[in-house]
Amino acid sequence: MKYDIKNVPYDKKEPTGEVRIEISIKENEAKDFEDYLYAQETIEIEGIPYLSQLDKEDTKNKTGCETGCCWAASCWMINQTGTKINHNDRIYFADPINVNNLADGITTIITEQEFNEAVLYVKNQLQLGKPVLCGTWDNRTKEAYENGKLGPEAWNNKLSGSNNSATTHFVVIMGYGYDKSQDKYYFRFYDPGRSDLTQGTSENNKFYIDEVNLEIMNSSYRGKIYKVIEIRKNF
C-alpha cells in the first residue's frame, strides 16, 4: 500500500536521520531572541584614552577640575570618542532611602519596562561606538563618607529638586558581554577613581545585569557593593 508521508501521523513516521525545527517569533522580540542565540556576543569600544582623577595635575589640565573630579574625568574620556553627553536626559534606577545618610541604602524606583529599555539603550549606544556616562552608589559606611570628607548626605542634584540623588561616583560604560562563570550579562566600565591604568581599565571592571531585581551591580568591586544609580544619555 502506498501513502503520502506528508499525511502520516507524526508518531507513525519513520526516522529520516534529519531534524528540522522552525520557530516563529514576534518582530518586537527578535532582538531578545538574537541575544539568547548568541549569548557570547561581546561589545567593546577600543581606543578610549584613560584619565585618572587621582592624577590631579593631568586632570586639571584636561578638564579644569580640581576637586571630586570623577564626573569631569569620565566626561573627558567619553568626549575623546566624539560622543557628546546630554546631561538633561537621564535615567535613574534608584533613590536614597535617606538623603541625609547615603549609608542607609537605596531603593529601586525604575519599572521593569524602563529597566529593559535602559539596558537596551546602553547596548545600542555601545554598538554605535558611543560610551555611556554612569553614576554609581556603593555601600560604604557613614564614617567612611565622613573620613573621605565627602559627607554622608546626597550631593548630586537631579534636574529638579535638591539633594536627592544617591550617585557618589561616575564611571564610563564602554563594553557589554556575557560572563559564563557568573551566568550573567554585564556592562564593562572604566573607573577614573584608580591611580593605575591597568586597574582603571581592567577587564574585571564589570557591572552585572540583574533583570529580576532590576539592578546593575557588582557585589565585590573594591571590597564593596557598587550599583548603577543613573545613566546619562548621549546626543
Image (tube, grey):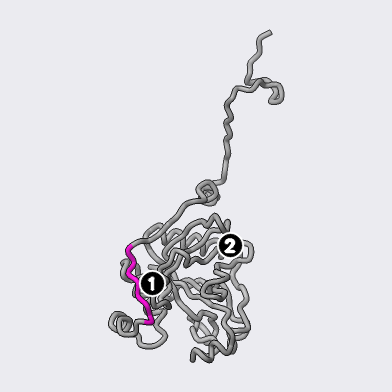
- Kindly identify the residue that appears in the image at 49 percent across and 83 percent down: 156
Could you classify mark 2 by the number of other residues whose Cα lies within 10 Å: few (under 14), some (14-19), or many (20 or more)? few
Sequence-earlier tag: 2 or 1? 1
Q: Split into 4 quadrants, where in the image is the C terminus?
A: bottom left
Image quadrant where residue 58 sits: bottom left
Would you say 183 lies left or right of 56 here? Answer: right
- Kindly identify the residue that appears in the image at 58 percent across and 30 percent down: 19
State the image coordinates of residue 68 (x, y, percent, origin top left).
42, 85
Vertical relation: 75 (above or below) 164: above
Could you tell me the amino acid type at mark 1? Ile
Residue that extends furthest to the left in the rendered view of this protein: 61
Would you say 176 lies left or right of 73 here? Answer: right
**Disc 2 to disc 1, C-alpha distance:** 23 Å
Image quadrant where residue 195 sits: bottom left
Would you say 95 lies left or right of 231 here? Answer: right
State the image coordinates of residue 59 (x, y, percent, origin top left).
33, 81
Q: Does residue 197 belong to the magenta stretch?
A: no
The foreground one among 234 and 199 is: 199
Q: Does residue 50 belong to the magenta stretch?
A: yes
Magenta part mainly helix, strand or loop? loop
State the image coordinates of residue 139 (x, y, percent, origin top left).
58, 79
Q: Which residue is mark 2?
A: 113
Image quadrant where residue 97 sits: bottom right
Helix, strand or loop at mark 1? strand
State the image coordinates of residue 1 (x, y, percent, origin top left).
69, 8
- Kindly identify the residue that appears in the image at 63 percent across and 21 percent down: 6
Helix, strand or loop at mark 2? helix
Could you tell me the amino acid type at mark 2? Gln
Callout 2 touching callout 1 (CB < 8 Å):
no
Q: Which residue is mark 1?
A: 85
Q: Which residues are magenta?
A: 47-54
